[in-house]
Amino acid sequence: MIMEYINKVEISGEIAEIRTSEKGTNFVMLKQMVTYNNIERPRLFEVLIAAERKELTEKISVGKMVKFIGILTVFKMKKFNIHKMLIEANSVELI
């Protein structure tokens, strides 16, 4: 088994928000609309784009439909006692 593919994810949706850190890292909120009990609700995912990945940041803007391919990391935030998912993007495709 090749270890690099264990956490590989592909996720698509609409870019709802983009935040940029002081060091230039972009945090993208990706929104998907899902139907549960006949009620449509948004589901949000956080995608990280490293500051040095300029070719990826040039493709993104709020409101665009995109597909991200990257690595999923799940970690526990001790301060809030919750688990958090973060996807580090390796590629972006406009859809």
Image (cartoon, rainbow, N blue to C red):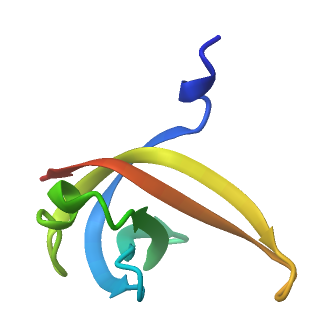
- 29 or 3, which is in the foreground? 3
Q: How many marks?
A: 0
Describe residue 95's horizontal placement relative to residue 68 as left or right: left
Identify the image quadrant of the N terminus.
top right
State whether residue 7 is above or below residue 84: above
Q: Image point 16% across, 55% down: which residue?
A: 55
- 11 or 24, which is in the foreground? 24
Where is residue 64, by image quadrant? bottom left
- 70 or 35, which is in the foreground? 70
* x and y, in percent, of residue 14 in the image: 25, 70
* x and y, in percent, of residue 82 in the image: 81, 77
State whether residue 94 is above or below residue 78: above
* x and y, in percent, of residue 44 in the image: 47, 74
The answer, for residue 52, to whether it is visible in the render is: yes
Q: Image point 82% across, 88% down: which residue?
A: 80
Q: Image point 21% across, 57% down: which residue?
A: 56
Where is residue 37, by image quadrant? bottom right
State whether residue 49 is above or below residue 8: below
Q: Image point 42% across, 85% down: which residue?
A: 21
State whether residue 92 is above or below residue 1: below
Where is residue 86, by image quadrant? bottom right
Describe residue 72's horizontal placement relative to residue 70 as left or right: right
The answer, for residue 39, to whether it is visible in the render is: no
